[in-house]
Image: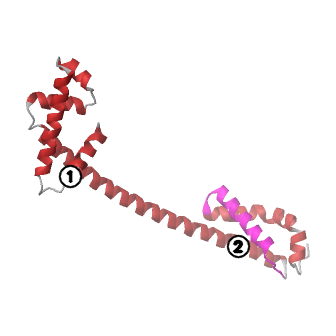
Amino acid sequence: MDTFHINADILHKNIKDIYNEYHDSLLAFAKSYVMREDIAQDLVQEAFIRLWEKDHDFLSEVALRSYLFASVKNLSLDYLKHLDVENRYAEAYMEKTSQEDVIDEQFDKEVMELLFKTIDCLPKRCREIFLLHLDGLSSTEIADKLSLSIDTVRTQKKRAMKFLREHFQSQSSSNISFAFIFFKLLCSI
């Protein structure tokens, strides 16, 4: 390799030799920034691709070496900046999601408390049947468990639903809609 002048033609003819000569030291250099071998390997490869694609003239081997190390350093710093932006975005997203989850959990808790307070107002047998329904039992299973007819179970479930619907519709001061409460109720079954 000509140590006094390296133009694009010489560089292209000798790229494999240049790669072999500098690869390991550039890899170690990149790794000192990014701390990951796979990323460091990508950055070194990108530096060689840029060297290949642009028509550079170097007056000395020292200039070529300086270019390669500066290129790897800049690529490494760019990668770290990008990683920092990704991390800040992820943290902001997680914080926002976490806050929304807390609000949702609190709202769900309030809705469920209100719902179960209302269920507690049902007549004893009607409440018992409706709670078994909420536990996921079918009308047949409830009828068998309580020694009732299936029609009685269905009638009591309808009465419970009608009572709950009327109760929540009459709660006009509360911003909780009957449909939303029942959606939450169905999701919890």
Q: Please indicate whether residue 14 sits to the left or right of residue 162 in the image.
A: right
Task: Provide the residue designation for mark 1.
Answer: 177
Would you identify the image quadrant in which residue 153 lies?
A: top left
Dominant SS of magenta comes to: helix
The answer to whether 54 is drawn above or below residue 85 in the figure is below
Front in this rendered view, residue 44 or 90: 90
In the rendered structure, find residue 149 and report the number of the disc placed on it. Answer: none
Residue displayed at 32% across by 57% down: 100
Q: Quadrant of the N terminus?
A: bottom right
Front in this rendered view, residue 100 or 48: 100
**Which amino acid lies under the numbered mark 2 shown in the image of this protein?**
Ser
Distance CA(mark 2)–CA(mark 1): 61 Å
Task: Provide the residue designation for mark 2.
Answer: 71
**Mark 2 crowd level (few <14, some 14–19, many ≥20, 10 Å Cα):** many
Does the stretch in magenta take in 36?
Answer: yes
Disc 1 is placed on an element classified as loop
Residue displayed at 70% across by 74% down: 70
Circle nearer the viewer, 2 or 1:
1
Residue displayed at 79% across by 73% down: 53
List x then y, in percent, for residue 65. Answer: 78, 73
**Mark 1 crowd level (few <14, some 14–19, many ≥20, 10 Å Cα):** some
Question: Which of pointers 2 and 1 lies earlier in the amino acid sequence?
Answer: 2
Would you identify the image quadrant in which residue 157 lies?
A: top left
Q: Please indicate whether residue 168 sits to the left or right of residue 79 in the image.
A: left
List x then y, in percent, for residue 131. Answer: 19, 32
Task: Magenta stretch: give its range.
Answer: 34-58
